[in-house]
Image: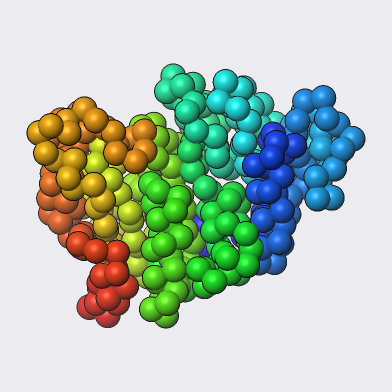
Amino acid sequence: MSILINERTTFIVQGITGREAVNLTRECLDYGKGAKVVGGVTPGRKGREVHGVPVFDTVGQAVENHGGPIDGSIVTVPPGFTKDAVIEAIANGIKLLVIVTERIPRGDVAEMVEFADMHGARIIGPNCLGLIVPEVCKMGGIGGPAQDAAKSYKPGVVGVMSRSGGMTTEISSSLTAAGLGVSTAVSIGGDAIIGSTYAELMPYFEADEETKAIVIYTEPGGRMEAQLSEWRKANNSRLPIVAFMAGKFMDDDEMQGMSFGHAGTIVEGKEDSATEKILRLEEAGIKVVERIDEIPEAVKERINA
């Protein structure tokens, strides 16, 4: 099993004729059992094809051509147009949106997330690489070209969530090498406001019988770790969680208000610090490791406990 996507998931690529989107589409088509990319959208480019995928001017045209509902969309349009693209997709019945675009104004992101909530849709990102079900399909650039993704991601029992796209693959590769494998890996995005937090994705993993543990990669800044800790306490989760906290040096006084790595890693107060986050996670029974290479053994210990 998996969460959010499977071999039957249909999706489009908005902004498909852009250079990054052309490569991303190829990667998705080539990986696993082959993604069901049923269309692309770029205004003014109707009638073209990208790797055999038909291009339309609007999402509505793509839905009409498909002859039924489309499950998802990868959004790769420029930041100034992302909000309109997302609203258009949701208005046409799409329920899963992977927003690759970065540097979207915070106000636009907040509006997109609110609109998605109102219409029962889920956003992954923005500023993310998407998600992958090993040897089945991927939605986004996660893992890179198909041959590279095939090496890093093997089917298994660990769900992975990461604020860093690159570290999603690094952690998954370590789990694969240790024989644990991955059930589903999600690059949730590194911006200050995102569509799906750790806590919001936990119920999906909780419902997936094949997932036996969770690994998260996190950073200073924001309140997502506190939300996850509270969710775990309140829901008596069956899944052990192992976490790696990057950027501990951000706790130095002179680093207050500065950003590390991603837009969401601005430490504005004590609650945002790595030290405080680690304390909250450990109080909720979440194991925090010092190094990436400690993750597989920590997961094994908790699965077998």
Q: Nearer the viewer, residue 199 or 33?
A: 33
118 horizontally vs 77: left or right:
left
Answer yes or no: is residue 71 visible: no
In this picture, is 195 found above or below 289?
A: above
Residue at the outermost left position: 253
98 horizontally vs 37: left or right:
left
| Rendering quarter of residue 172 | bottom left
| Rendering quarter of residue 174 | bottom left
Q: Residue at x 69, y 66 (%)?
A: 33
Q: Nearer the viewer, residue 111 or 188?
A: 188
Quarter of the picture containing the N terminus is bottom right
Residue at the outermost front position: 254
Q: Residue at x 26, y 51 (%)?
A: 246
Residue 145, how many percent across, how many down? 62, 59
Residue 116, how many percent across, how many down? 52, 31
Quarter of the picture containing the C terminus is bottom left
Residue 210, how many percent across, how many down? 46, 71
252 horizontally vs 59: left or right:
left
Residue 139, how many percent across, how many down? 60, 51
| Rendering quarter of residue 225 | top left
Q: Residue at x 49, y 61 (%)?
A: 184
Answer yes or no: is residue 113 visible: yes
261 horizontally vs 276: left or right:
right
Q: Residue at x 19, y 40 (%)?
A: 250
In this picture, is 93 found above or below 286?
A: above
Residue at the outermost right position: 47
Q: Nearer the viewer, residue 226 or 50?
A: 50
**Count the marks: how many?**
0
Which color scheme did the rendering employ for the protein?
rainbow
